[in-house]
Image (cartoon, grey):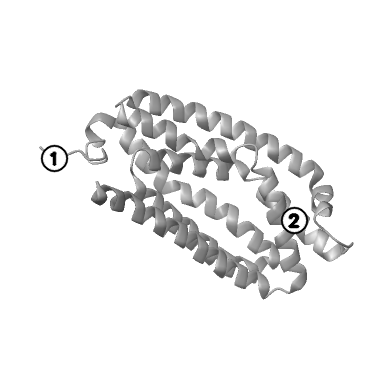
Amino acid sequence: MIREYVRIGVPMCLQSATLCVGMFVITAVINSYGSETVAAFTIGSKVEQLATVSFSNLAFSFSVFAGQNFGARRYDRIKEGLRKGLMIVGSLALLSTLIIELFAPRLALIFMDEGNEIVLERAVAMIRIEAAMLFALGFIWTLNSCLRGIGAVRITLLSSIVELVCKIGLSLLLPIFLGYIGIWIAAPSGWVLGMIPSVIFLFWWAKAPEERSAGLMAGKKKK
């Protein structure tokens, strides 16, 4: 039992650490563009938190649904639940996108102590760029929650590493051509590219779930 805890817990710990390291690096890049960009990033991050309220907990809770049905060997329910879960999360994300795109300046002003046109302009740019890709954030959260539920935590770690590498690489590369806008594009790009390992694994697993779940089943001994 302890061995199983370690098998699942260590990759999840590394996944969290990987994302934290990524934020440190991206924050360092943002700091190099001056106080206005730092303030814009802070404002944009707060608006992003508001935008994801509608679907974040729904996406994260899918691990419970997947884990219960995985233990019961109801793989058909996992596949059906994942399809419907992605539809619900995607719909809520698109609704959030619509609201954020329409009211981005007003939402940014909520978190500004004083009127600063440069900060407002950069914050609105970040908000609108990330809002356009909220569906990708919802999808990667839902897919990785499903993977954690079935015990495929190494794939979620790989997904996080891909997301981290893309965010860091693009946050360093894109600003050379696009300025601070390149930093805002880096995060959504990481969400999209980070989904690739998760999608590939889930397609592979879904083709023969009974056979391919044997190695993922907690506590299952090889015969």
Residue 171: percent from left, percent from top: 59, 65
68 to 179, vertically: above or below: above
Q: Name which residue type carries label 1.
A: Lys
Location of residue 152 (image quadrant): top left
Q: Badge 1, how many Cα within 10 Å: few under 14, some, many 20+? A: few
Residue 74: percent from left, percent from top: 33, 24
Q: In the image, is 216 to the left or to the right of 88?
A: left
40 to 218, vertically: above or below: below
Calculate the distance from the C-alpha at mark 1 to the C-alpha at mark 2: 54 Å
Residue positioned 80% across, 41% down in the render: 102
Q: Name which residue type carries label 2.
A: Ala
Q: Disc 1 or disc 2, which is closer to the eye?
A: 1
81 to 17, vertically: above or below: above
Residue 197: percent from left, percent from top: 40, 48
Question: Which element is circle 1 on?
Answer: loop
Report the residue marked by disc 2.
125
